[in-house]
């Protein structure tokens, strides 16, 4: 409805129904024209940033226009020409997650930004989410020691039993994050896959090993704050010779085929698994989206559009 300050609320969004006049291509028989029916919509943390009126240089992150539909990724059925644009045979919601933007984020973020080596110690925050669950599995495939953190007992269990993490903990139960990380990484962390920022990043910095790498993927704990928290221990980056590198996955989209070649065989062989949280009904979209910021989602948050 309007730009959002602080934590987003369901009432910040409207679900409207109505009819629209279709604007068909000049040549209706043209093979290039598509008419789509949305099936699955992706809920992603970056959408929150676009609800704030702060102009950015990057068009992918420019503010939404209040009153206009939220744009995002999704899966749609092509009603006009079903043979021309076909998907590879995987469950449809996968294209918003493991085979979509979050999957690519995990893949390029881990293999390229983190420069991992066999046997290294890897820590992942927001580890059970759309991106984190895959980073952990990629790191295990590489022969790393992998620990993740998440915000509930159920998620911690998932990390260990379903995704094969070596260990996991509930960060909400830890009063002293520096000590908690020391417990899981007595010899320090080689790679930190950063999804949350703030106090977690500060605690990680004190536990990093010399020449460690931090892939700054996201900082979800900061997205709803009017004033971002300061990082007290940032000078550690200097004397420990740490490489801290941010990345945006949109820069890698032209490498999608390379990513598919890598990930599809693992999915088919059951060596990589994926957990999704599918909310039914477009009218529940706003609550699904804001649930990302309270950790209500267990796995990749998707909305199934069930309306005819
Ligand atoms: P998730 O599926 O992980 O959902 C978000 C999760 O973040 C929640 O479930 C919750 O899990 C955790 N969370 C929410 N608020 C906080 C908080 N205040 N402190 C700590 N944890 C919190 O989302 P994604 O996997 O899609 O995204 C993960 C991160 O990656 C985000 O920061 C996102 O912005 C970033 N990202 C970056 C991309 C890039 O190109 N650089 C592309 C895609 C995502 P829990 O219960 O564990 O707290």
Image (cartoon, rainbow, N blue to C red):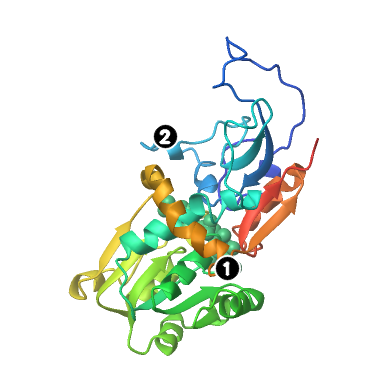
Please say if 127 is above or below 54: below
Residue plotted at (41% across, 65% down):
194
Rendered location of residue 140, percent (x, y):
44, 75
* Residue 281 can be seen, yes or no: yes
Q: Quadrant of residue 158?
A: bottom right
Residue 83 position (above or below residue 230): above
Determine the residue located farthest toward the right in the rendered image: 308
Judged from the image, the secondary structure of the residue bearing numbered disc 2 is helix
Q: Which mark is residue 59?
A: 2
Q: Nearer the viewer, residue 253 or 285?
A: 253
Q: Nearer the viewer, residue 160 or 127?
A: 160
- In the image, residue 253 lies at what x, y percent? 41, 44
Mark nearer the N terminus (2 vs 1):
2
Locate residue 32: give its quadrant: top right
* Rendered view: 153 above or below 214: below
Residue 308 position within the rendered picture, expressed as x and y whole percent measured from the top left:
81, 35
Q: Residues within 10 Å of mark 1 (few under 14, many from 20)?
A: few
Residue 180 sits above or below residue 133 on the image: below
Horizontally, residue 233 falls left or right of residue 8, namely: left
Q: Is mark 1 within 8 Å of ligand 1?
A: no
Quadrant of the image containing the N terminus: top right
Q: Which residue is mark 1?
A: 270
In the drawing, what numbered circle is on residue 295? none
Disc 2 from disc 1: Cα separation: 37 Å
Q: Is mark 2 within 8 Å of ligand 1?
A: no
């Amino acid at each position: 409805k309007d730009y959002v300050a602080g934590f987003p609320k369901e009432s910040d969004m409207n679900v409207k129904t109505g009819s629209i006049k279709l604007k068909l291509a000049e040549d209706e028989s043209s093979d290039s024209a598509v008419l789509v029916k949305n099936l699955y919509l992706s809920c992603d943390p970056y959408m929150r940033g676009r609800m704030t009126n702060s102009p950015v240089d990057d068009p992918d992150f420019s503010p939404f226009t209040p009153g206009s539909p939220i744009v995002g990724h999704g899966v749609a059925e092509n009603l006009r020409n079903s043979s021309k644009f076909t998907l590879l045979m995987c469950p449809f919601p996968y294209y918003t997650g493991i085979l979509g933007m979050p999957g690519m984020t995990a893949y390029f973020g881990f293999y390229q930004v983190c420069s991992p080596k066999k046997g290294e110690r890897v820590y992942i925050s927001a580890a059970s989410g759309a991106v984190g669950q895959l980073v952990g599995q990629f790191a295990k495939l590489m022969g790393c020691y992998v620990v993740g953190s998440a915000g509930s007992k159920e998620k911690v269990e998932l990390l260990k039993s379903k995704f094969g993490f070596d260990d996991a903990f509930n960060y909400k139960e830890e009063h002293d994050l520096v000590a908690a990380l020391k417990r899981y990484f007595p010899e320090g962390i080689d790679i930190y896959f950063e999804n949350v920022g703030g106090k977690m990043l500060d605690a990680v910095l004190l536990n990093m090993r010399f020449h460690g790498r931090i892939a700054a993927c996201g900082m979800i704990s900061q997205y709803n704050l009017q004033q971002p928290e300061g990082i007290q221990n940032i000078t550690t980056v200097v004397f420990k010779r740490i490489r801290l590198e941010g990345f945006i996955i949109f820069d890698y989209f032209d490498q999608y085929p390379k990513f598919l070649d890598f990930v599809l065989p693992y999915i088919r062989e059951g060596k990589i698994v994926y957990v999704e949280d599918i909310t039914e009904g477009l009218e529940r979209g706003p609550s699904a989206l804001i649930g990302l910021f309270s950790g209500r989602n267990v796995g990749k948050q998707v909305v199934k559009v069930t309306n005819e």
